[in-house]
Image: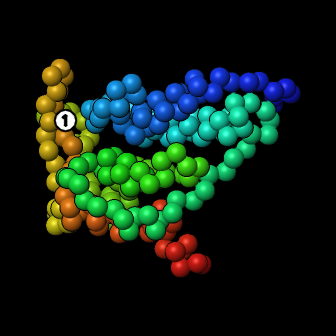
Amino acid sequence: MLNKETNIDLTKLDIAIKYIERMAEGKNPVTNQDIIEETIVNDPNVIRCLFFIIDVLKQVQANGGVITSNTKSKKEKFPFETTKDFVFRKDNSISYIMQQVNEPIEGKNIKKLSYVKVTKWLKEQGYLTEEEDKELNKKVTLPTEKGKEIGIYTEKRERLVGPSYIVVMYNEEAQYFIVNHLEEIFLGEGEMLGT
């Protein structure tokens, strides 16, 4: 617990928040370019940690750069009505789809929606499955027949260095399917019905 106030350089704090947000969104923090899917930054535990750090830094920012024992700032709930304005851009992976979903709340004190929960829900509903890939010698996420029917497919990508990897892609139909189910995925049917 802090007993005194400590002032933080707000310019450096702004840059730190921007860099960490970019990493949490799967981008290079300096260039803001998309980074390879199979990196440590795309690990669900790392993403959760990055979003936690963002929350802490935004609390400090909201407090004018002053760290005290009273810097509590609760995030607002995601406004699901913003998903009505979602427009398909191109076939993409789930991390980039969710990045697009979160664009309307950028810079606001609102909890972003994570692709990790969407992927988990798709597995629970039978649209995705995990299988051992003998060629890659690791578990990979793949669409089931049910998933393929709504437009989920895979692409094999080559790296300049290292082994190839598989990316799960979502076409227009699959993206709208996900966007139309976001409230159910993140709130659950009970909360949606007010029970």
x, y percentage for residue 111?
Answer: 54, 51
Query: Residue 151's image quarter?
Result: bottom left
x, y percentage for residue 57?
Answer: 61, 34
Q: Which residue is found at the position 65% from the left and 35% from the top?
A: 61
Is 31 or 1 nearer to us in this picture? 31
x, y percentage for residue 150?
Answer: 20, 66
x, y percentage for residue 91?
Answer: 19, 52
Query: Residue 155's image quarter?
Result: top left
* Quarter that holds the N terminus: top right
Q: Residue tagged by mark 1?
A: 165
Q: Looking at this view, name the residue that lies furthest to the top.
A: 161
Type of the residue with mark 1: Tyr
Q: Looking at this view, name the residue that lies furthest to the front.
A: 11
Q: Which residue is found at the position 32% from the left and 52% from the top?
A: 97
Bin the neighbour count of mark 1 within 10 Å (Cα to Cα): few under 14, some 14-19, many 20 and up.
some
- Residue 176 versus residue 195 in the image, above or below: above
Is 186 or 19 nearer to us in this picture? 19
Q: Which residue is found at the position 59% from the left and 78% from the top?
A: 195
Q: Which residue is found at the position 23% from the left and 49% from the top?
A: 92
- Residue 48 versus residue 98 in the image, above or below: above
Q: Is residue 90 left or right of residue 52?
A: left
Is 140 or 103 nearer to us in this picture? 103
